[in-house]
């Protein structure tokens, strides 16, 4: 348990930050899910549109420290590759 005034404040700050990060992570996963669903349905134009919306969200999260930069790039790359394969 936090003892000092500053430690108690840090606990509050961390809790707030955790909520913000959870919301951002959830939003990013929703974008990714929309791309996945379009790929599964075989709809290339819808998948491209979904990817165009998902990519900035993923990269923004990597800049905010929610996801590692390379993990974000890898995720975008793999999604792009799968969308490109649709015929």
Image: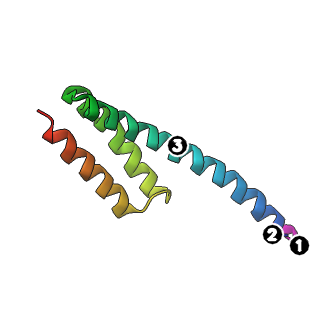
Closer to the camera, 13 or 75? Answer: 75
Q: Residue furthest bottom?
A: 3
Query: Do labels 2 and 1 touch, CB within 8 Å?
Result: yes
Pointer 3 residue: 26
Above or below, 64 against 29 in this view is below
Can you say which quadrant of the picture contains the C terminus? top left
Local crowd at mark 2 within 10 Å, few (<14), some, or many (≥20)? few
Sequence-wise first label, 1 or 3: 1
Q: CA distance from mark 2 to mark 3?
A: 28 Å
Q: CA distance from mark 2 to mark 1?
A: 6 Å
Q: Residue furthest front?
A: 40
Q: CA distance from mark 1 to mark 3?
A: 33 Å
Above or below, 16 against 31 in this view is below
Residue depicted at x 27% and y 46%: 79
What percent of the width, then of the height, locates residue 12? Answer: 77, 57
What percent of the width, then of the height, locates residue 37? Answer: 33, 32
Q: Which mark is residue 3?
A: 1
Residue depicted at x 59% and y 48%: 22
Local crowd at mark 3 within 10 Å, few (<14), some, or many (≥20)? few
Q: Is residue 32 left or right of residue 22?
A: left
Specify the segment rendered in magenta.
2-7
Q: Choose top left, top right, bottom left or bottom right for residue 32.
A: top left
Residue depicted at x 29% and y 36%: 52
What percent of the width, then of the height, locates residue 21? Answer: 58, 51
Q: Magenta stretch: residue 78 in it?
A: no
Pointer 2 residue: 7
Local crowd at mark 1 within 10 Å, few (<14), some, or many (≥20)? few
Q: Choose top left, top right, bottom left or bottom right for residue 15.
A: bottom right
């Amino acid at each position: 348990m936090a003892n000092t005034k500053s430690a108690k404040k840090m606990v509050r700050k961390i809790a707030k930050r955790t909520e913000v990060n959870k919301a951002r992570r959830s939003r990013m996963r929703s974008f990714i899910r929309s791309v996945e669903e379009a790929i599964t349905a075989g709809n290339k134009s819808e998948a491209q549109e979904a990817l165009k919306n998902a990519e900035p969200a993923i990269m923004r999260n990597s800049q905010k420290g929610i996801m590692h930069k390379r993990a974000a790039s890898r995720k975008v790359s793999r999604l792009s590759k799968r969308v490109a394969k649709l015929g």
